Amino acid sequence: MRRLPQLCVLIASALFAGSAFAADKKKDKKDDDDEIPMEKPLEVDESDFKDAGDDVAEPPPTRLEEADKEETEGDDLDFGDDEEEGDDIKFTDDDEQQTVKPREKGEDTAQLYRDTQKKCKDMTPDEEQLVWEEYLRKYPKTLFADRIEERMEELSAVMFGERVPGSDKGARQVDAVQRELNWSVPWGLSPIDPRSHISVGVQWGFPSWFGGKVDAEYAFMRQASAHVLLGRDFAGGVVQPGAKYAIIKSSRTGTILTAGLDAKINMSPTFVAFRPIVSFGQRLRVMDGLDISAQVAADFETREASDIRYNWGLHGELRPNKIVSVFWEWSWDAKYLGNEDVKDSFRFFTTTFGLKFNAQKAKTDQGGGRLDAGVGASYAYVQNYWGFYAGGVDLMGDYYF
């Protein structure tokens, strides 16, 4: 009970102190409001917020007197398509060429075009013309059509002798009508092509035979020539002059048809024979050329109790490249065929095969200065009355003027 009055005193003191604090706070607020009258607007001096030098007016920007110039320098990048520049595309990097592939059927690539150009480098105009014609048939959508057509026009102008200034740029100097065929020379048959050349051959046969020949020919015009042959025949040594004329000699089609007449002078025994010769040849476009020729001839001897001697043969020579060629030849000789006075006719059939090499390249477009050398083997698979020759080894050489 003694503590109750003390508690009441503490409560009363706290209430009195709170009232006094509230009165002091209201008084302080009123004093603050009296210092700044609310009815008057607040005056602010704007100069207090400016830095020194702000009153100086800045000059206006200088007006451009000239318009901006367009950049027309050569460094500009042009991403547009230029059809004219498409013809001047050059592929100089082989690796890049391999990456270019046909986009559709019938289209070629730069590599195919360049390979065909290299292939045509040493061809005659007519041969090159056929190659490009075949190229256009195979690649009708070629990217180089303009160039190919231009080249074909140049070749046509050369072949037909209708050149105009500038049309023979890059063309060869010899027209097709005057270009030589450079036909292969057979071993046992007469040369089919009228050409200025010398042929030399040596034959070593078994069991007992040794022979040879030297044939010099001069072409006084492209289709006509004369020659003299020195050699050894089965009837003895012979001197054989003659002449021939090419009725057809086309470098464009690779066709040749020749007629000739030789006079054979046999030395031992001595007699004279006349030999008419007809030869036909066709060059096929296989690899670097396949020459196939056929020949028919007959010897009409002037001695008594003689008969016609028939000679015919076939010759084929394939050139895989410009350096080497392979050849095969068949020759048939027969006499006294159907003669009642002779019980058994004379027959001598041989075959010869071998290789030829280009020992010296041609110095002119016509093949002049070229030297070919070869070696072959002969075999007599049918023989009657000529038993001293069963086969042999042949050496040969041809030089062209």
Image (cartoon, rainbow, N blue to C red):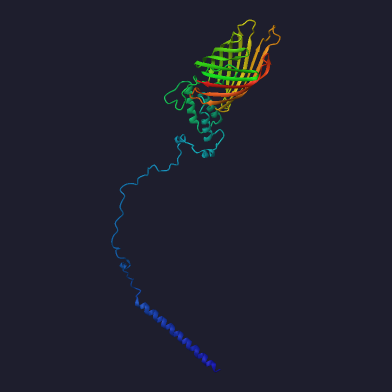
Looking at the image, can residue 95 be seen?
yes
Q: In this orientation, which residue lies closer to the viewer: 348 or 25? A: 348
Quick check: 215 left or right of 345?
left
On the image, the x and y values in percent for residue 90 come to: 47, 36
Q: Quadrant of the N terminus?
A: bottom right
Q: Residue furthest front?
A: 208
Whether residue 257 sits left or right of residue 169 in the image: it is right
The quadrant holding residue 264 is top right
Outermost residue, left side: 56
Nearest the eye: 106 or 341? 341
Q: Residue at x 51, y 90 (%)?
A: 8
Is residue 186 visible to the viewer in this orientation of the structure?
no
Asked which quadrant contains residue 394, the reply is top right
Tell me how many marks there are. 0
Percent x, y of residue 236: 61, 12
- Residue 5 is situated, as x and y percent measured from the top left of the image, at 52, 93
- Above or below for 33 versus 156: below
Q: Quadrant of residue 104?
A: top right
Q: Residue furthest right?
A: 343
The image shows residue 121 at horizontal and vertical percentages of 51, 28
Query: Residue at left 51%, top 92%?
Result: 6
Which residue appears farthest toward the top when viewing the image?
304
